[in-house]
Image: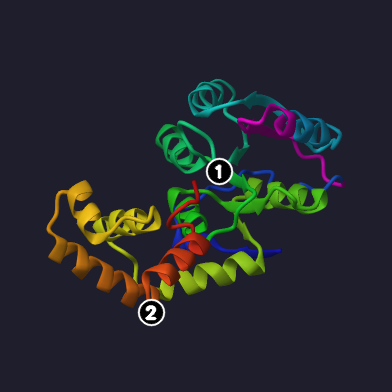
């Protein structure tokens, strides 16, 4: 794992006892688990509870419940599923940071699309891990985040670096792109978004240029890879 210092994001305040090594007499890291799939959540809780350095203090199946438990237990680290409804992990991270700016969040997901990684870290998450991560890597990441550091894999760090250099789409261009992904014509997009067909064409042209693609099909393909649009 590559540990990134957090100068590029909102600062995390490290605790006095920052190490997660068993040799040191540090307090157990208190963890909140948030995932709307109960089987996955409870399985992860059982694994973490076997580690003498970690204490799973609460589990939540959704955002609102997580906020209540976060306020009640004040966990050291929160493991949060990225894709939940109606409140996803990114929105939950923002809400938790409103309650406590020093909150330490690790986003867990089965996806590693560029846009979601960027949005998650920009929202205040300290790490982003795929759910098939090895257990020792997860424990290591919990320790690094507990210590107040950002912990990002080299592959995800590379995606972030590439994202920073890309020309971002505007909110309206994203609306148009999502309509394109649904197979709508320019006329249909104009009716849906209450804009003229000429404006739609201008947005599509800008989208193709920013995504560096030749046509609408390629634009949708690239957008799905980056997480700008999702398959239904």
Residue 72 x/y as whole percent: 55, 20
**Can you say whether 232 is above or below 4 in the image?**
above
Q: Which residue position holds label 2? A: 214
122 and 218: which is toward the camera: 218
- Locate residue 207 relative to residue 137 in the image: left or right: left
| Residue at x 56% of width, y 63% of height | 5
Decide: is 87 above or below 14.
Answer: above
Separation of disc 2 and disc 1 at Cα?
A: 31 Å
Q: Residues at badges 2 and 1 in contact (C-beta under 8 Å)?
A: no
Q: Residues within 10 Å of mark 1 (few under 14, many from 20)?
A: many
Q: For residue 153, what is the image quadrant? A: bottom right
Q: Position of residue 154 (x, y in %)?
A: 65, 69
Provide the secondary structure element on which disc 1 rests: loop
In the rendered view, does 133 fall on the left or right side of 52?
A: left
Residue at (33% x, 74% y) in the render: 208
Q: Which percent across, then down, holds residue 114?
A: 51, 62
Q: Residues within 10 Å of mark 2 (few under 14, many from 20)?
A: few
Q: Look at 75% across and 52% down and name the residue there.
A: 133
Examine the structure image and report whether residue 37 is included in the region drawn in magenta.
yes
Judge whether residue 164 is colored magenta. no
- Checking the image for residue 82, the label placed there is 1
Given residues 161 and 53, the one toward you in this image is: 161
- Residue that appears at 55% across and 69% down: 159
Residue 19 in view in this figure: no
Q: Is residue 146 above or below residue 227?
A: above
Magenta range: 23-41
Colouring used for the render: rainbow
Residue 210 in view of the camera? yes
């Amino acid at each position: 794992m590559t540990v990134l210092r957090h100068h590029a994001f909102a600062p995390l305040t490290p605790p006095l006892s920052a190490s997660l090594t068993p040799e040191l007499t540090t307090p157990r890291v208190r963890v909140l688990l948030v995932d709307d799939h109960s089987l996955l959540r409870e399985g992860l809780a059982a694994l973490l509870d076997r580690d003498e350095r970690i204490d799973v203090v609460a589990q939540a199946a959704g955002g609102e419940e997580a906020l209540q438990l976060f306020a009640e237990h004040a966990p050291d680290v929160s493991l949060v599923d990225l894709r939940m409804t109606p409140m996803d992990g990114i929105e939950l991270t923002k809400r938790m940071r409103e309650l406590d700016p020093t909150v330490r969040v690790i986003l867990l997901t089965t996806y590693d699309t560029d846009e979601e990684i960027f949005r998650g870290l920009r929202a205040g998450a300290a790490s982003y891990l795929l759910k098939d991560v090895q257990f020792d890597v997860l424990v290591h990441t919990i320790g690094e985040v507990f210590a107040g550091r950002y912990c990002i894999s080299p592959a995800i760090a590379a995606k972030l670096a590439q994202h920073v250099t890309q020309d971002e789409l505007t909110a309206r261009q994203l609306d148009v792109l999502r309509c394109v992904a649904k197979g709508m014509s320019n006329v249909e997009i104009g009716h849906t978004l209450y804009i003229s067909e000429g404006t739609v064409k201008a947005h599509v042209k800008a989208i193709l240029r920013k995504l560096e693609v030749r046509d609408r099909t390629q634009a949708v393909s690239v957008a799905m890879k980056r997480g700008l649009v999702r398959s239904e």
